[in-house]
Image: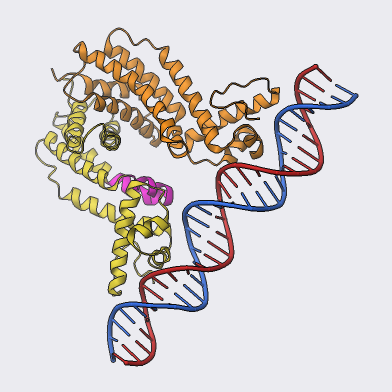
Chain colours: A yellow, B orange, C blue, D red
Amino acid sequence: MQTLGTTGAAGAKRADARKNIAAIIEAATASLARDPNVSVNDIAKAAGVGRVTLYGHFDSRAALIREVVDRAIHDTDAELNGLDLEGDPRDALARLLEATWRLTHRYGSLIVAAEAALAPEDIHDAHVQPMTRMRGLIERGQASGAFRSDLPIAWLVEVAHSTVHGAADALHRGDITEAQAPTLITETVLAVLTPSH
Amino acid sequence: MQTLGTTGAAGAKRADARKNIAAIIEAATASLARDPNVSVNDIAKAAGVGRVTLYGHFDSRAALIREVVDRAIHDTDAELNGLDLEGDPRDALARLLEATWRLTHRYGSLIVAAEAALAPEDIHDAHVQPMTRMRGLIERGQASGAFRSDLPIAWLVEVAHSTVHGAADALHRGDITEAQAPTLITETVLAVLTPSH
DNA sequence: CCGTTCTCGGACACCTGTGTCAACGTTGCG
DNA sequence: CGCAACGTTGACACAGGTGTCCGAGAACGG
């Protein structure tokens, strides 16, 4: 058992087993996105299987979260790598922000769950990966004079992320609608990044 | 026992009892600001008393948190009410942001603890109170033309808060220093609020 | 100085969540 | 078919946190 590790390669398992594994991962992703402290029991119930069945496929709660996070990182990378980050930095940033928002909205508080359950080393990648992408784009915009350079680059990246995060909170609270979120985020971040004159 | 409820009025108690209560509240505030999931045991140890002594003064973990939160709200209100919010809206906003930052930094993740332990009704006040202050100031600035009016007011308030929150994260991560935080926050929020032309 | 008040520590019951086991179904393949 | 391999299940053991009770002892305040 436990033939699938962090690689996630489901080999020659029985058909129903593979179906259950998929259901568990899907349910875990959705549940953890909502509440980072969901119990394994709730995740199993959401997947339509028994709790012990889940333990038959994943060694521990941490192993399950690791698998979910790995998939999230993989999907995120795939989605973000398919993005066109060339051209006008402002337009590129808008595209990157829109994608980041979509992913944040999908995975929600998964990162919180990961931080609580996984070792710091495992978290590092999840944070650094999208960070450097945003950072690189902002640096390119600074070099071309499209973005302001009088604030620390790390801070500008942080602003982009907190704005996206804040939009998620505001949406959850009902202050804004899902439709207007991307516009508000882009408008806001660009307002910060635009040089005074 | 338990003569102090949410009012927090310590009456004619014994001197050491009052001292211990104060130590407990102080330790709980500091502990919860760091980790919203601290156990009652750890809080008691941090206060230098036994766990049972703590239960002698507070009916439950929730009651303790409620007391801590009430004090935090009270102190916050006092500090914010002492602020001069008149004059140039930009300067007033800078003052309000600076105070908000200081308080956020002091109380840290206390709100998270409150959200997990208290009923939604009890949380409402903690959120709404500082919200309306910021909102009123922004509205005044909008009326005088100092701030942009093309974005929803609720979103602008959210931006101010997520920027402060983001600064706390960046500081915790070591991306910025405590000294530059107020400047960065003010600079950023003003960049968003300043009309395009 | 003495009674009241408070602290302290251990022990207990209870709850929730995690992880494991052996027995019970079910699937898949010859 | 039929059997062996595998997945699934309820039941069990364990750990950590909360809240309570008790008795012994210390400190306060009159």
Q: Quadrant of the N terminus of chain A?
A: bottom left
Q: As rendered, which of B87 and B81 lies closer to the eye?
A: B81
Tell me: A187 left or right of A171. left
State whether residue A135 is above or below residue C12: above
Find the magenta span and give its range: A109-129
Q: Which residue is depicted at the point 13% across and 35% down? A: A89
Q: Quadrant of the C terminus of chain A?
A: top left
Tell me: C5 left or right of B26. right
Q: As rendered, which of A189 and B2 lies closer to the eye?
A: B2
Q: Can you see residue B27?
A: yes
Tell me: A94 left or right of A16. left
Q: Position of residue C21 (x, y in %)?
A: 52, 73
Q: Can you see residue B180?
A: no
Tell me: D8 left or right of B148. right
Residue B9 picture quarter? top right
Residue B151 picture quarter? top left
State whether residue A128 is above or below residue B192: below
Q: Which residue is depicted at the point 21% across and 17% down? A: B147
